[in-house]
Amino acid sequence: MTLKYAFWPGCVSKGAAPELYLATKRVAQELDLELHELDQATCTGAGVLQEQNPEMGDALNARTFALAQQMGMPLMNICSTCQGIESMVQDKLTKRPEYLAKVNAILADEGLHYTPGLEIKNFLWVLVEDIGLDKIKSLVKRPLTGLRVGPFYGCYILRPSSILGKEEHPDRDHYLEMVIEAVGATVVDYEGSKKCCGFPILTVNRENSLKQAGNHIHEAQDLGADALVSPCPLCHLNLDAQQPAAKEVTKHEIDLPILHLPQMIGLALGVPPNEMRLDHHVVSTKKLLAKLPEMAVR
């Protein structure tokens, strides 16, 4: 059965990490996901906008929600940070009806209206809750047997837990491990998997930001990881794009590929690496790809 979503790709997948957007669209074909892109939606603000002008930030997110509701579909994003911000705004608008009315008055200029109740899900949650691990396993054509993969969640998909559906889905902070195992890889359990990557402070305290990223990478690599996988493109930027700089700051000999979640899924489903731009990373994925078994269609 085809699953349909209003698709919010976020800013980073259309800018600094276009390989994430391409991989998501390509993998959606294999997973029978029908993605209706919200090409008129705006940035979530990543929390920064809300600090400067909360009402504007909330109105922009409510506008995205209203556009999704016009489609009559749940909203899917591919960014942990987007998920966190959208969940926080949704929670605020649901609990404060007077404020919601004020925001809807702003949206009325475009003929839009948001009604609380929209389902908003990160791609990771869609994989486990909507598609299901058994279905994913049945679609695997190239099991990632022998690969050791460390999960890296990103902050906003875990915290604050009170607004991220943990009561209904208590295992959401273990989903990455579950998906890694579903595609045949071995999970590398390391302390930094649920900590901050350092990206939020990159521009104000570059050294500490790079130390955070470098130490997480070194820890996972030291435990035998072949790669890290993350559902957050901002984490990817700090762990992949900034990895050479993190190496200089920490003095650790780090050289660890960082995968976007759809890329890992795509590899297991038999999608050619070039169709997911695995050559677009700063840290080369060649040694990782060399460890993949030959395609074994089940």
Image: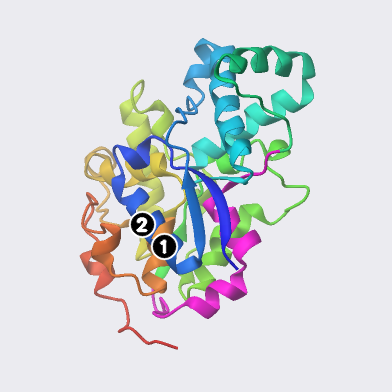
* Residue 96: percent from left, percent from top: 77, 19
The residue at the point 69 percent across, 57 percent down is 171
Q: Nearer the viewer, residue 81 or 253?
A: 81
User: Which quadrant of the rendered structure holds the N terminus?
Assistant: bottom right
Image quarter of the C terminus: bottom left
- Residue drawn at (48%, 39%), measured in percent from left and top? 196
Residue 141 is one of the magenta-drawn residues? yes
Label pair 2/1, CB-CB below 8 angstroms: yes
Residue, disc 2: 23
Q: Where 145 sits versus 228, above or below?
A: below
Tell me the colour scheme of the image.
Answer: rainbow
> Does 244 sit above or below residue 110?
below
Answer with left or right where residue 277 lies relative to residue 57.
left
Q: Which residues are magenta?
A: 118-147
Q: Position of residue 105 (x, y in %)?
A: 66, 12
Q: Is residue 192 left or right of residue 214?
A: right
Q: Amino acid at mark 1?
A: Val
Which quadrant of the view contains residue 284?
A: bottom left
Cα gap from disc 2 to disc 1, whole angstroms: 6 Å
Q: In the structure shown, which secondary structural element does the residue marked by tag 1 occupy?
A: helix
Q: Residue at x 54, y 80 (%)?
A: 138
Which residue does the image show at 41% across and 69% down from the upper left?
148
> Tag 2, which secondary structure?
helix
Residue named by callout 1: 27
- The answer to whether residue 224 of the structure is visible from this angle is no
Which amino acid type is marked by label 2? Ala
